[in-house]
Image: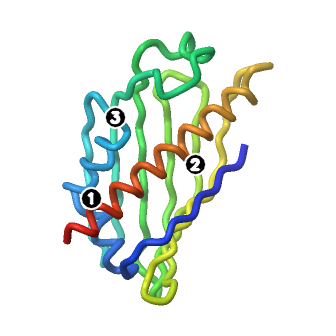
Amino acid sequence: MDISHTHVFAATPDDISALLADPAFASARSDAAGAAHADAIVDGTPATGFSVSVRQSVPASTIPAEFRSFVGSQLNVRYTEVWDPATGDTRTGTFAVEIVGTPGHAAGSLRLDPDGDDTRFTADGTVSVRIPLVGPMIEKAVASAVVKALREELTVADEWLARR
C-alpha cells in the first residue's frame, strides 16, 4: 500500500536539515509517538549527510484492536532516516520503519525542497505486510499509523522551530 505525506515548514531547508540532525530533536520525535522507552542516535552532519535511528516501544493501542493479538501489548519499532548531503537547496533521503517481530515494514523516500521562504517536506513510501488473507487490512492500519505518527512528529518540529 502506498503512503504519501507533505508538510510545509516556515523555515529554510538548511534550518530543517539542522533540526532533523539535532539529537535532542530526535529524542523529542519519539516522545511525540507516546514511546514508553526510546533511544535516538544521530550520525553525521547536515553538510556531509546524516542518519537518524530511533528505537522505541509504543503501546499497541496505536493500532486497531483486531490486530493487537499479532503484536502483544507493546510494539518495538525501529525507525531510520538517511539524508544525503544537500544538492543545491534540495535534500533527499530515505526512511524505513520496522515493527520488530512482525512480517511487515514501511520504506520510502524523503525530500526537502525550497518553497519561497518555506520548505516543503515530502515523504512517499510503501507499506508491505506479508500475511496471507489479512495482509492488506494490516497494511491499511500500518499505513494509517505511519502517517499519523509522521503528522505528530512534524507538529513537534513546527513547535520546536517556533521556540527558536
- In the picture provided, is 95 more to the left or to the right than 4? left
Quadrant position of the C terminus in the picture:
bottom left
Q: Which residue is the site of mark 2?
A: 107
The image quadrant of residue 15 is: bottom left
Give the distance between the C-alpha atoms of the residues marked 3 and 1, in whole angstroms: 24 Å
Residue 34 numbered tag? 3
Q: Which residue is the site of mark 1?
A: 43
User: Eyeballing the image, is 147 above or below 93?
Assistant: above
Secondary structure under the numbered disc 3 in the rendered image:
loop
Residue at the farthest right position: 133
Residue type indicated by callout 2:
Ala
User: Eyeballing the image, is 71 above or below 116?
Assistant: above
- Image point (24%, 47%), residue name: 27
- Image point (42%, 49%), residue name: 152
Evaluate if marks 3 and 1 touch, with contact meaning CB atoms under 8 Å apart: no
Secondary structure under the numbered disc 1 in the rendered image:
strand
